[in-house]
Image (cartoon, coloured by chain):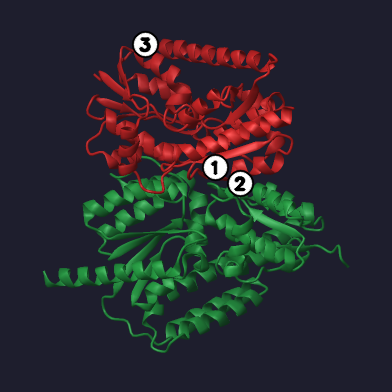
Amino acid sequence: MIKKVGIPRALLYYKYHSLWESFLKELGCELVISPKTNKEIMNTGIGIAVDECCLPVKIFLGHVSYLKDKVDYIFIPRVISLYKKEFLCVKFWALYDVVKNNFEGIKILDYTIDINNKKSEKMAFLKLGLNFTKNPLRIKRAYDTAKIKAQEQKEMLIKKQEIFLKTKSDKIKILIVSHPYTIYDEFLGGPITKLLQKQDVELIYSDIVDEKEAFKESKKISNDLYWTFNKEFLGAVGIYKKYVDGIIFLMTFPCGPDSLVVDLCQRKIKDKPIAVITLDELQAEAGLKTRLESFVDILKMRRK
Amino acid sequence: MSNAKKISFPHMGNYYIAFRPLVELFGCEVIVPPAITKRTMELGSKNSPEAVCVPFKYNLGNYIEALDMGANVLIQSAGGCRFGFYGEVQNEVLKDMGYKFEFIQTLSNFNIKKISKDFKQINPKLTNQKITKGFILAFFKMIALDKIDKIIRENIGFEVEKDSFERLHKKFLNKLDMAKNLLAIKAVEREYLRLFKKVNVNKPKNPLRVAVVGELYILMEPFSNYNIEKELGKRGVVVIRFLNLTSMLHEYLFGMKHINKLIKHASPYLKYHIGAHGTASVAIAHRLAHEGYDGVIHIKPFGCMPEVNAMSILHKVSKDHKFPIMYFSFDSQTSETGIKTRLEAFYDMLKMRREKNEKN
C-alpha cells in the first residue's frame, strides 16, 4: 500500500491543488507538499534540467528533487488534452519520462488525461484511486467530493474578483496575464506581485475566470488557438480588459506557446497599455522594479 | 492585370517541387520564393516575435520575399506543435507590415472533404478528379525526391570527382520539376536512380555511420542546419536520416500505432509519447546504439519543446550505452564556425573511438 505521497509545488499544482489534495486525503493518503520555491530548489532544478528547458520545468525538477527521499511516491500527473482538438504544452506530456530518467529509482504515481484519445478525468482518477483502495465506490465518492470542493473554491474566487473589479476605487487596476505556475510561484511571480502591491496597485489575475466564458471570448482574438491554457488567459483578457488600466503579460523564458500568443495579443489589443515581462533564471530585481514603476507611472498619467 | 492572383508558399528543402502540383491546383500563377539565403533569415527574424522558434522566421522571410516579387496569395499548412499556430500570427505580422494579400491555411489534417473545400474556395472550377491528380503527382514527386536524397546522403562523402553528386542532383531537380504527369515522374526517377548509382565513389568497407535525428524543419531544410549532412559527408561519413516527408505521411496514416511502436523501441527510457518527433528521436537513438552505429547528431531549433523533452532522455541513453550523441540548437544567431568546430571535434572523437574499439 502506498502511504506517503509527495506533490511538487510547481506547474499543474497551482491549478489542481485543491482537487488533488482532497481526493488523495479522502483515500487515506499522507501528503507531503514541497515548500514554496526558494533559491536552493531553483538551483537544484537548474542543475538537473537541460539548459533550454523553460524555467517552470526547471523549478518543477527542483521540487521533485526536494521530495524524492522524503516520500514513497511522487505524484506527477500527465495531462495531454482537456478538450477535443486542444492540447496542453508538450512539457506536460513528458514530465513523467523526464523525471524517471533524471532520478535513479524514483517511484511515480501518475494518471493520464487525454480527451482526444478518450481518456477522461473521471477514468484517470478511478485508476489512480485503485492504488489506495479496491473499493470503486469509495473512489468515486472521493472524486465527487473533491471535484465539488475544487469547483466551489474556484467559483468563490471568481465571484470575489468580480466584485473587486466592479467596485470603483482610486487605485490603479492591472490585469496580470500569466500561467498560474508562473504568477503564484514564490520565486517567479512573487517579487512582481509584491512590487506592484507596494505601489498601491490592485491586481486582477487571468486564471481566475470562468473557463467556458473565457473560451468563447478567446475566439474574438484568435480562431486557431489550440493550447487550452493560453485560450483561457486570452479569454480572460477579453473579459477583464474593460475594467483595468493596463495589462502585464508575464512570461518565462523560453515559453513556446506564449512566444506566439503574447505577440498576437500585442498586435491585436490596441486600446490598453501593455507591458511584457519575460523572466529567466538570471533576473535582476532592480531592472524589474524600474520597469514596473515606470509602467504604473504611465497608467497613472493616463488616468489624469 | 494587377489583380490577378499570384500564389506562393514557404520553402522546405527541395520540397517546393512536390508542393508545386498542389499549389497549381489553385489555378493561378505560382511564385516559388527565392532559395533561402542570409537575407531571408534577416527579413524573417527582424519581423518575428523574439522568442519564437526559428522555422517561423524562415517561413516569414520566404513570405516577405515572395510578396516583394508580387505574390498576393500565401499558403501555410498546419498541424503539430507550434507550427499549427504559425499561420495566424504570420498573417497578422505581414498585415502589420502593410502588405495586402490573402492568407490560406490548409492541410491541417488529411480530411479529404475539408481539403477539397479549401481548394475549391479559391478555384471554383476545380473538380475532385483534378484535386486527386494533383495529390498523386505531389506524392510521387515527394517519393522521388526522398529516394534520391537518401542515395546522396549515404554516398556524397566518397565521391571521386568533386561535386559530381551535386551537379547531378541539380539536373535531377530541374527535370523532376518539369515532369507534368505520372509517367514522366516515374521515368525521371528511374533514370536518375540509375545515373546516381553510376557515380564514381570510393567507399571504404566499413565507414563511420552517423544518424541525424531531431526536429523536422531543421532536418529537412539544409540552409537552416548549415548543411550539416554535407559537412559530415565531406569527412567521409555515411549519414542516415529516418525523417522525411514520406516517413511523415506514413506516421500520419498509422497514428497512434506508429507512436506505440516507437515507444516500444525507446523502452525502458520512455513509457509515454513526449510530443512531435521527440519520441522518434529517443527511439532511433536507442535502436542505433544497439545496432553498432557510430553516433547520433540531434538537431533542433532553439527552444523546441518536444525535442528539449527528448534531450534529457537522450542524455541517459547516451550515458547508459556509452553511445556518442551530439546536440545542436539552431537560431537566427547561430555561428557557423562554432558548428563546424564542434562537428569536427565530434568526428575526431568518433574516429578515435572506432580505432580504440578495433584494437580491443
The colour of chain A is red
Which residue position is annotated with label 3? A26
Q: Residue furthest right?
A: B1
What chain does badge 2 belong to? B
Q: Which mark is residue A257?
A: 1
Could you say where residue A125 lies in the image, as x and y percent from the top left?
A: 41, 21
Q: Nearer the viewer, residue A278 or B189?
A: A278
Q: Quadrant of residue A128?
A: top left
Q: Amino acid at mark 3?
A: Glu
10 Å crowding of disc 2: few (<14), some (14-19), many (20+): many
Between the C-alphas of marks 1 and 3, the distance is 36 Å
Q: Which mark is residue B168?
A: none
Q: Which mark is residue B85?
A: 2
Foreground tag (1 vs 3): 1
Q: Are marks 2 and 1 in contact (CB under 8 Å)?
A: yes
In this rendering, the answer to whether B186 lies above or below A86 is below
Q: Nearer the N terminus, badge 1 or badge 3?
A: 3
Instruction: Answer yes or no: are tags 1 and 3 on the same subunit.
Output: yes
